[in-house]
Amino acid sequence: MTPPNPTSVSTESNEDLDAVTVADDLALALSLADAADRITLSRFQAVDLHVESKPDNTPVSDADTAVESMIRSRLAVARPDDAVLGEEEGLVGAGGARRRWILDPVDGTKNFVRGVPVWGTLLGLEVDGEMVVGVASAPAMSRRWWGARGTGAFTRDATGDTRALRVSSVSRLDDAFLSFASVEGWRKADRLNQFLDLADQVWRTRGYGDFWSHMMVAEGAVDLACEPEVSLWDMAALVVIVEEAGGRFTDLTGQRGPGHGTVLTTNGVLHDAALRSFVR
């Protein structure tokens, strides 16, 4: 897939490599997502799918490990001086690298292993601490979302059509649609009362969960989404997409970015009002 209207904002991996553009990095990320989709779809609902439990009692499938291994191998060739942080293998090539790819090979593994189609591969690029490229690919849903800093955000739907993303214009919480993952997560984080305070103020709530909640914020289908516990690889790819669609992306205290352990995404207009449920 080739993104519409790529720009030529320059970044450099180091002085020994030719400069690459944001468009180059986005094209690479999209090609890696294509390859990941082929792996994940071939293993989704496979009768011989191998699943293990990690030390934190979350599942990991052979699809998770195969996708992360493939992406790391291809990045080692295409961007040899870039660092790579992945959910399954951690950080490789940190050093003084200005550029870091952050990936979740299968976001929504619990859905994946149960045969629920809401899961996806997430891949983002960080340059000098700023996320500049993001791709979220959900092949079992026939959906993909992507964005790059300064170029906008886009989605391809099940019909194969591509369109630009734009957040909603809803301006009142009592007219807003809120998405989340699970009530249990808020209870476990001892923040259930905060979540229910927000939920009581909005028009409608649904537990879509994981990456999908935030992509629906980006496309204006829902107006805000929040989670009490997330990892960097869960969110890094999504920042650019939400922000390039006109939304805001912070933690539950209002700090911008994906690395603070919690997340609130909104259409921007609702953000400060939503934060009041979490910041007293």
Image: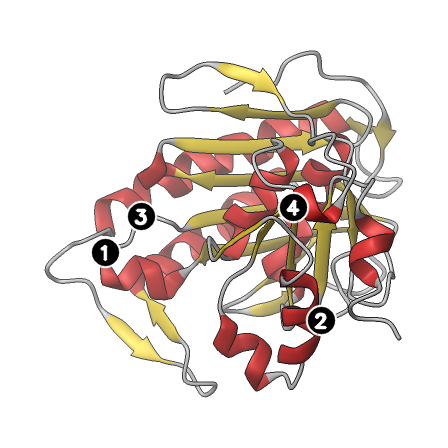
x%, y% of residue 202? 65, 53
Asked if the residues shown at circle 2 and circle 4 are in contact, with their CB atoms under 8 angstroms apart, the answer is no
Q: Secondary structure at mark 2?
A: loop
**Distance CA(mark 2)–CA(mark 4):** 14 Å
- Mark toward the start of the polypeptide (1 vs 4): 1
Q: Which kind of residue does numbered mark 2 sit on?
A: Gly
x%, y% of residue 104? 53, 57
Q: Secondary structure at mark 3?
A: loop
Left or right, 242 with reference to 39: right
**Distance CA(mark 3)–CA(mark 4):** 19 Å
Left or right, 116 with reference to 47: right
Mark carried by residue 115: 1
- Mark toward the start of the polypeptide (3 vs 2): 3
Asked if the residues shown at circle 3 and circle 1 are in contact, with their CB atoms under 8 angstroms apart, the answer is yes
Q: Residue at x 44, y 48 (%)?
A: 120
Q: Label 2: which residue?
A: 261
> What quarter of the picture does the C terminus occupy?
bottom right
Q: Label 4: which residue?
A: 238
Q: Label 3: which residue?
A: 117
